[in-house]
Every structure is written in C-alpha cells, then in structure tokens.
C-alpha cells in the first residue's frame, strides 16, 4: 500500500471546493429513472446519457471525481474515445462503484446487506488498470419499527471495512458509504441516533481492518427527518444536527466527508450543504463536500428525456447544479443562483 498516493488522491477529491458526481447507477436503477421519463431502457440510451454528462463543457471546474458503473467504464463516446479518457481530459478523476448491490439480509426482515467482496481483489486490479483511482461501496440502513438491528449494522460495517482495506491495497481510495435511508416517518432525532451508531460501528471496523483513515472519503447521509415525518425541520436545524452527529463519530484524520443526496430535492441538498459550510467550515477537521447523483443529474435528465436536441439545455442544467454545489462548499450558495440560471 502506497499511503502517500492514497492521501494525495483523497485530498484531490475534496480540493478547491469541488465535489464528486455520482453517475454509477446500476443498469436497473438507471432504467427505473429512464422509465419514469419515457426514455428507452437500453444500453444505447444509457451510453448517450453518460456521454452527455461527461462531455458537459466546464464540468471539471466544479467536479473533482466521477463515479462510474461497470458498464460505463467500458464504454466510449461517439468518436470512440473511452469515457475514462474523456473524464481525465476534463480534469476529473475517474472512480468506480464496486459493490454488487444490497440484497435482503437473511434472518433480518426489512433489512439489506451489501454484497460484492468475492473476487473483489481481482476486479479492483482490473479497474485500476483501466484508470480508476478510487472506488465506492454503498451500504443501506433502513429505519423503522425495531430496525436497524445490530446484526445489520455490524455486518454492513464489516463489509465496508473489508472493501476499504482491499481498495487501499490496490492503490484506490475507498469511498465508504453507509446510507441511512430517508424512507419512513422517523424523526430527525431518530435519524441522528441511527446515523451516529452506524458511523461509530463503521469506524470501529475500519480501524480493526487497518484502513488508513487519511486515505479514504466518507460518504454519509445528511441527518434528516424521514420523508413522511410530519415535522420537517428548517435548513439550519438539519445543518446543525448533521455536523453535531459527524463531530461525535468521524475521526479528524478523515480528509473529507462527501454527502449523498438520498432523494432530497436538488435545491434543498445545496441549501443544506451551504448552511453547514457557512456555520462550521472554519472549525471542522474535514472538508464538507458532496457526492450527489440525483441532486446533480435529475433536473438535467428531466430536460434531456432521451432527445438529442435537448443535449445543450440538459448540459446547462447539469453544469448549473455542479456550480451551485461548489458554491455551497464555500458557503456562497444563494436561492438567487437558481433564478439567474433559468
Ligand atoms: P444520491 O445522491 O442520488 O443519493 O446517490 C448517491 C449515491 O451515489 C448512492 O450510492
């Protein structure tokens, strides 16, 4: 393991107020999003969408790294240039999702365990050869009556740590993503409690598995009330609860925390990240950044709808979200930015 390379890559992923663009939806998740908009669920359409994203002019000014899916890392643009090269030429670091999905967990109704450790060493070596410099693994933790269980939290934390150790061995920075889901009617206080327990367990396992904390990025959920909770706190309350929770559980050696968006609207995700940076940026040991999929892609996808003629307008919308989130890292995002773009 070359610690310096890992630390340099991890720092580069959160440098210059930039953040990550997650474009690593599995084929089935990508197809579900396409189906809602009447876009054909074909490899051709998925390739065209990913080409639109990676050829957006100026994307590298706000995006440090792009997370790809196995199908995408093997694809090319319409001129035959591999997407990995297009991304690198845009000044963006290529990364790859390496888990094989969250499956029903035996003996734990309503809970999931993420799979993908078998053969991972060989897959990481191949992705590294293809140009990937970091990887991602997502664990999902549902909140509800009697869940999450200790069994689910511990099994997912151990898998995350084993994945992270294998990544570092291969010279790839692991993005460690324990996602506490928004689905449900739980309160913000309950999300805070569950997120803190998950993060503590994940970091215990990362230490047990000898993962270099300086050479990883944490990708957590923000601390939010459940989607159907009657009480929905203000932006500043979410910002305060999220940072308080992270301070309790995330060691200072971690260089960056890049939030997932998790189904929040694009504008709320930017506003909440902004509020955290306005209030706390100068006092935190780690950078607070973003690693959004839906909160960057969704407005652009709704404009594109699979039509070639809509590509420039969709790229404009994608770039706008990337810029809003970079502004949010600086604590300079305002609602007026949204009005000016349209
Ligand atoms: P969302 O931002 O849409 O939650 O996706 C982030 C991600 O990469 C999920 O693994």
Image (cartoon, helix red, strand yellow):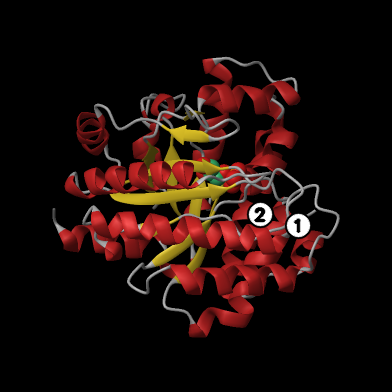
Q: Which residue is mark 1?
A: 341
Residue 232 location, quadrant? bottom right
Residue 245 point in image, percent of width and height: 55, 69
Give the x, y percent position of residue 255. 37, 68
Q: Position of residue 272 (x, y in %)?
A: 68, 65
Which residue is pictured at 23% across the width and 43% down the height? 166
319 left or right, relative to 201: right
- Number of marks: 2
* Residue 112 drawn above or below residue 242: above
Residue 262 lies, in percent from the top left, at 63, 47
Q: Is residue 159 left or right of residue 2?
A: right
Q: Would you place residue 246 above or below residue 298 in this image?
A: below
- CB within 8 Å, label 2 to label 1: yes
Taking the image as four quarters, which one is ligand 1 found in? top right
Picture quadrant of residue 128: top left
Q: Examine the rendered structure and indicate whether residue 11 appears above or below residue 134.
A: below
Q: Secondary structure at mark 1?
A: helix
Q: Residues within 10 Å of mark 1 (few under 14, many from 20)?
A: few
What residue do we see at 70% from left, 50% from top? 264
Q: Between residues 166 and 29, which one lies in front from this camera angle?
A: 166
Q: Secondary structure at mark 2?
A: helix
Residue at the extreme bottom: 283
Residue 62 in sight here: no
Q: Is residue 139 above or below residue 69?
A: below
Q: Which residue is mark 2?
A: 320
Between the C-alphas of marks 2 and 1, the distance is 7 Å
User: Which numbered circle lies on residue 297?
Assistant: none
């Amino acid at each position: 393991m070359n610690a310096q390379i890992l630390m340099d890559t991890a720092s580069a992923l959160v440098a210059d107020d930039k953040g990550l663009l997650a474009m690593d939806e599995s084929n089935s998740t990508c197809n579900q999003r396409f189906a809602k908009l009447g876009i054909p669920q074909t490899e051709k359409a998925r390739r065209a969408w990913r080409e639109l994203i990676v050829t957006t002019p100026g994307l590298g000014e706000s995006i440090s790294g792009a997370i790809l899916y196995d199908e995408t890392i093997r694809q090319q643009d319409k001129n035959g240039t591999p997407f990995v090269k297009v991304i690198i030429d845009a000044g963006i670091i290529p990364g790859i999702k390496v888990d094989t999905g969250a499956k029903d967990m035996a003996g734990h109704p309503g809970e999931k365990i993420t799979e993908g450790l078998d053969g991972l060493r060989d897959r990481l070596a191949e992705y590294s050869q293809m140009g990937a410099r970091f990887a991602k693994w997502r664990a999902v933790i549902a909140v509800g009556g009697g869940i999450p269980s200790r069994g689910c939290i511990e099994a997912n934390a151990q898998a995350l740590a084993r994945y992270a150790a294998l990544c570092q061995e291969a010279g790839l920075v692991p993005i460690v993503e324990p996602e506490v889901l928004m689905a449900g009617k739980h309160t913000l206080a309950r999300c805070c409690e569950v997120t803190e327990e998950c993060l503590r367990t994940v970091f215990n396992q990362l230490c047990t598995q000898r993962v270099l904390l300086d050479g990883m990025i944490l990708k957590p959920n923000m601390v939010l009330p459940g989607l159907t909770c009657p009480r929905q706190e203000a932006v500043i309350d979410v910002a305060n609860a999220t940072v308080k929770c992270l301070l309790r559980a995330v060691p200072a050696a971690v260089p960056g925390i890049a939030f997932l968006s998790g189904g929040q609207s694009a504008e709320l995700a930017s506003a909440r990240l902004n509020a955290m940076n306005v209030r706390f940026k100068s006092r935190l040991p780690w950078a607070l950044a973003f690693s959004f999929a839906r909160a960057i892609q969704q407005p652009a996808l709704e404009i594109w709808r699979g039509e070639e003629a809509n590509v420039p307008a969709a790229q404009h919308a994608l770039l706008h979200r990337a810029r809003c989130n970079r502004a949010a890292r600086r604590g300079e995002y305002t609602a007026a930015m949204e009005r000016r773009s349209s």
